[in-house]
Amino acid sequence: MPLGLILPSVSTKSSTAIAEQAEHLGYDTLWVSELWGTDAFVQLADIATQTETIGLGTAIVNVFSRSPAVIAMAAATVDRIAPGRFTLGVGPSTLKAVEDLHGMAYDRPVRRTHETVELIKAYLSDSDRVTYNGDLISVADFPGLDVDVPVYNAALGPANRRATGRLCDGWIPHNIPFNRLPDAFEVIADTAQERGRDPDSITVAPYVPAAVSENKGTAYDAVRGHLAYYIGSGEGYRRAVATVFPDEADEIAVAWQNGNRTKASSAVTEEMVHSLAVAGTPNTAIERLRNIINKGIIDRPMLTVPRQADDELTLRTIDALAPNNW
């Protein structure tokens, strides 16, 4: 099974150097996230020129801060630099990111995602002229770009999962406990079938938070910080975790939003780490990753090393879980 890596931040190595290392270690795809400080498409364009075979993707860019046309142009540009290697991952992001960073109203995020994906796919097609009239977005009379770029959606709630089933080539879940992925995918599958689509054609590509250290506590603490951040920062993430851990998710969210990040991280239990991530010593982590991958629904897992990890832990994790080292 292919195994992807979300590009981490490492002070001692450039993004391009990490990408080259990931390609050498057998990772299938190098995914670039985007929140603040670096532009995903600019990074990928640079990485595309320095690598040869590794797939490239965004995981994710939000559907508010760029117009569908700008996202489509950026995707087409990266694909032309690295033909056949690019996957576009989009999502609604969070109220915090959209309103406090971009200064935009977090208005109807699922509808915004639906219309953006629908229009992006039209713009990437070979259509002579693209015209679209949605509730939120209307455009007229521009030609398609004629590039083949799969579009994945980072959908958590059922409404956004239905949009995935209607429109998308792949699904990027995050913070849905791994044992709940099959149930969550049923919404996507049912909607796809209603649209005459084959659910098996929709790639399931979950984030897999991961930390590997000879010191189990160090690895677990990094993952705890990662999970606390997401549960505390985004209501969709809190709800996803709460499908299995309702009391814990509420406690973590309250502590985080009250500014007590230490208490929030400490409230992440060992059971939550096991259900939502891969952490521990090398042998333990590899076995856990194997167990997750062997769940039949997952097609294309993406390792993400927590930002809370230092450079040594980050590089150790990338190496320990690399496909070529299994």
Image (tube, rainbow, N blue to C red):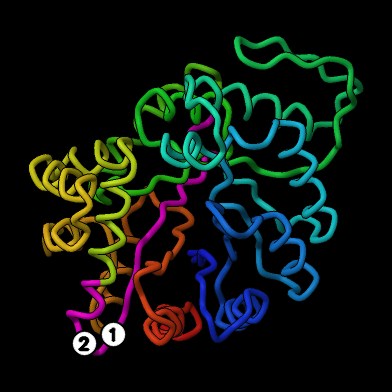
Q: Dot 2 corresponds to which residue? A: 215
Extent of the magenta region: 197-221
Could you say which is closer to the camera, residue 72 or residue 182?
72
Estimate the x, y position of residue 16 in percent, counting from the top left: 67, 76
Q: Does 109 appear above or below 311?
A: above
Q: State the residue at coordinates (56%, 38%).
A: 102
Q: CA distance from mark 1 to mark 2?
A: 5 Å
Q: Position of residue 212 (x, y in %)?
A: 31, 80
Q: Decide: is 19 above or below 274.
A: below
Q: Compared to 87, does 21 lie above or below?
A: below
**Local crowd size for mark 1, using a 10 Å CA cut-off: few (<14), some (14–19), many (≥20):** many
Q: Residue at x 71, y 71 (%)?
A: 53
Q: Position of residue 89 (x, y in %)?
A: 58, 45
Describe residue 314's horizontal placement relative to residue 291 as left or right: right
Q: Nearer the viewer, residue 218 or 165?
A: 218
Classify mark 1: helix, strand or loop. Answer: loop
Residue beneath the point at 19% across and 81% down: 216
Q: Quadrant of residue 244?
A: top left
Residue 241 falls in which quadrant of the image? top left
Of residues 180 and 118, the one nearer the viewer is: 118
Residue position marked by numbered label 1 in the rendering? 213
Residue in the image at 48% along x and 34% along y: 99
Circles 1 and 2, Cβ within 8 Å, touching? The answer is yes
Amino acid at dot 2: Asn
Q: Is residue 16 left or right of residue 184?
A: right
Instruction: From the viewer's perspective, tell me whether residue 147 is left or right of residue 96.
Output: right
The crowding category of the residue bearing disc 2, from other C-alpha atoms within 10 Å (few below 14, some 14 to 19, many at least 20), is few
Q: Secondary structure at mark 2?
A: loop
Q: Position of residue 150 (x, y in %)?
A: 66, 43
Quadrant assignment, res 213:
bottom left
Residue type at mark 1 is Ser
Is residue 236 a member of the stretch shown in magenta? no
